[in-house]
Image (cartoon, rainbow, N blue to C red):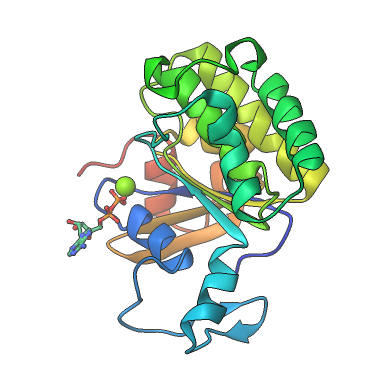
Amino acid sequence: MTLHAGKIYGLIGPSGAGKSTLLRIINLLTPASVGTYLFQGEPLPENGRNKLKIQRKMALVFQKTLLFKDSVWNNVAYGLKARNFNSKETEKRVNLLLEQVGMEELANRRADTLSGGEAQRVAIARAVAFEPELLLLDEPTANLDPVNIEIIENMICQMNREKKITVVMVTHNVFQARRIANEVIFIENGKVVEMGPTKKIFSDPEKEKTRLFVEGKMIY
Ligand SMILES: Nc1ncnc2c1ncn2[C@@H]1O[C@H](COP(=O)(O)OP(=O)(O)O)[C@@H](O)[C@H]1O
Ligand SMILES: [Mg+2]
């Protein structure tokens, strides 16, 4: 499977297909048992420090939001401080991001007092703050209400458009994939069934299985 820079990929497939596992392999959290991994054309370095360099080009957001027990503002600033951004640049970026996800008024709130949707908006802002080259999202809007889903989808598309961040988003919602992805990857039982432009996957897929899945007719 080859991912091209600058695109938004929607990763879909039934529960247990291996979507989360694939994201963890891409993020180098789980080593792949077979196959070869190339990042920007280069094989994976043996050296742990160089591996960390690659990991630092990516950000991963889970369905279950993980925030630090600290203020909203500090949560978003965290990755910038860790990467030694100066305080002026950090302040500028954090304020802009909080505005983009509609959280500027809650900047001083403790993250553990936020609603699920607010927390996930902060998690997305934190993930994109350092402008990763690759943003990995594992069902980031599952269980959220339509307003929060829209804010998060808009943020993802904006970051892709303006900052050229490549996105791989796992979603069990095929409509979401159709709304925001340029390319769709459909996997089942740990294998890519079909991968292609979103329009083609939805209107004229090569495989019958793909058609059944995107039409919601696949039985598991
Ligand atoms: N750490 C693990 N060790 C062994 N099996 C795992 C592990 N994590 C997930 N699995 C199994 O791998 C399969 C794919 O899981 P997962 O990637 O979570 O699927 P998805 O995200 O598509 O629902 C499932 O059968 C799951 O039980
Ligand atoms: Mg999963």
> Which residue is rendered at x = 67% and y = 76% of the image?
40
> Which residue is rendered at x = 70% and y = 49% of the image?
131
Using residue 21 as the reference point, say whether residue 102 is left or right of it. right
> Which residue is rendered at x = 33% and y = 60% of the image?
21
Q: Nearer the viewer, residue 29 or 147?
A: 29
Q: Nearer the viewer, residue 103 or 206?
A: 103
Residue lying furthest front in this view?
A: 87
Q: How many marks?
A: 0
**x and y percent of residue 105 in the render?**
63, 10
**x and y percent of residue 16 in the render?**
24, 52
Q: Examine the rendering and report whether any part of residue 1 can be seen.
A: no
In which quarter of the view is residue 17 placed?
A: bottom left
Q: Nearer the viewer, residue 28 or 170?
A: 28
Q: Examine the rendering and report whether any part of residue 6 can be seen.
A: yes
> Which residue is rendered at x = 39% and y = 61% of the image?
24
Quarter of the image for the C terminus: give it.
top left
